[in-house]
Image (cartoon, rainbow, N blue to C red):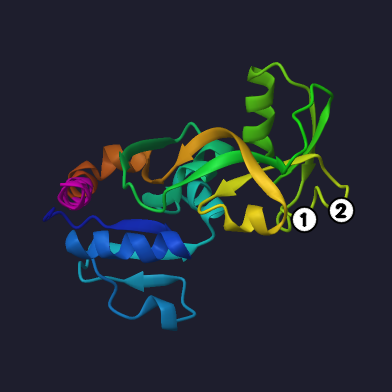
């Protein structure tokens, strides 16, 4: 990679995305020097002196990257859609942690044209999507316990991430409409891309090669 004494910090989303990102980074020659799962640290040195890793909540990754506290990041497309952000490039889809952002409602309850109460933590995405559909809704912000909201009379439907659908079924819900197909993306701070272009492009090329090998 670059011989210039520049360095790059990559912010990673903890949980499932982290577990699926680390093998891709390893194939790209970037490996943390300690077991991240056994440490309480949030910043880690790697096998490349020029590259360090941060671990945080997915919703914080675009904030760190857009504001330059991290040069690059890996976050789910759901978080990026919710956050927006003009200071970000999104150059690479890693194709990992695939799922769907969906509307779900109680089984055997017909769709209604009446004003819906929708519980979600993705209020920005939901507001834009329902507006584009010309549908009026009342959004209820929840950070958890979404699936039980209809049964408790708090909401008529929810907007949430759906993977296997098992949690929906266990709570008497069924998926109705897909808002977006979700996977994890690499994001880059726009200023960093200019200032540290050589190193960042080298990392992106190696990650893209890892993704392509897995796809072939």
Q: Residue at x 84, y 24 (%)?
A: 114
Q: Position of residue 78 (x, y in %)?
A: 52, 43
Secondary structure beneath dot 1 equals loop
Q: Residue at x 42, y 78 (%)?
A: 37
Image side of residue 27 versus residue 162, left or right: left
The magenta stretch spans residue 213: yes
Residue extending farthest to the bottom is 38
The residue closer to the viewer here, 158 or 123, is: 158
Q: Position of residue 106 (x, y in %)?
A: 74, 44
- Which span is picked out in magenta? 203-216
From this view, report whether residue 157 is shown above or below residue 17: above
From this view, report whether residue 18 is shown above or below residue 103: below
Q: Are marks 1 and 2 in contact (CB under 8 Å)?
A: yes
Q: Quadrant of residue 28?
A: bottom left
The residue indicated by pointer 2 is 152
Q: Position of residue 151 (x, y in %)?
A: 82, 52
Secondary structure beneath dot 2 equals loop
Residue extending farthest to the front is 108
Q: Residue at x 15, y 51 (%)?
A: 213
Query: In the rendered view of the protein, which quadrant contains the N terminus?
Result: bottom left
The magenta stretch spans residue 44: no
Q: Quadrant of residue 116?
A: top right
Alpha carbon separation for disc pair 1 and 2: 6 Å
Image side of residue 46 versus residue 188, left or right: left
- Number of numbered labels in the structure image: 2
**Residue 140 in sight in this render:** yes
Q: Position of residue 23 (x, y in %)?
A: 26, 64
Q: Residues within 10 Å of mark 2 (few under 14, many from 20)?
A: few
Main SS of the magenta segment?
A: helix
The residue indicated by pointer 1 is 148
């Amino acid at each position: 990679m670059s011989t210039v004494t520049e360095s790059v910090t990559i912010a990673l989303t903890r949980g499932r995305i982290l577990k699926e990102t680390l093998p891709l980074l390893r194939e790209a020659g970037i490996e943390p020097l300690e077991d991240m799962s056994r440490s309480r640290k949030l910043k880690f040195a790697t096998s490349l002196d020029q590259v360090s890793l941060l671990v945080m909540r997915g919703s914080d990754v675009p904030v760190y990257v857009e504001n330059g506290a991290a040069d690059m990041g890996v976050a789910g497309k759901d978080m990026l859609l919710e956050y927006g952000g003009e200071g970000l490039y999104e150059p690479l889809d890693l194709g990992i942690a695939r799922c769907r952002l969906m509307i779900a409602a109680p089984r055997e309850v017909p769709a209604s044209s009446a004003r819906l109460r929708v519980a979600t933590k993705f209020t920005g995405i939901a507001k834009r999507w329902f507006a584009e559909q010309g549908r009026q809704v009342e959004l209820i912000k929840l950070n958890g316990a979404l699936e039980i909201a209809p049964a408790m009379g708090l909401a008529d439907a929810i907007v949430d991430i759906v993977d296997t659908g098992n949690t929906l079924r266990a709570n008497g819900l069924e998926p109705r409409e897909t808002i977006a197909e979700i996977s994890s993306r690499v994001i880059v701070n726009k200023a960093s891309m200019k200032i540290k272009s050589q190193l960042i492009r080298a990392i992106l090329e190696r990650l893209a090669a890892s993704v392509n090998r897995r796809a072939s």
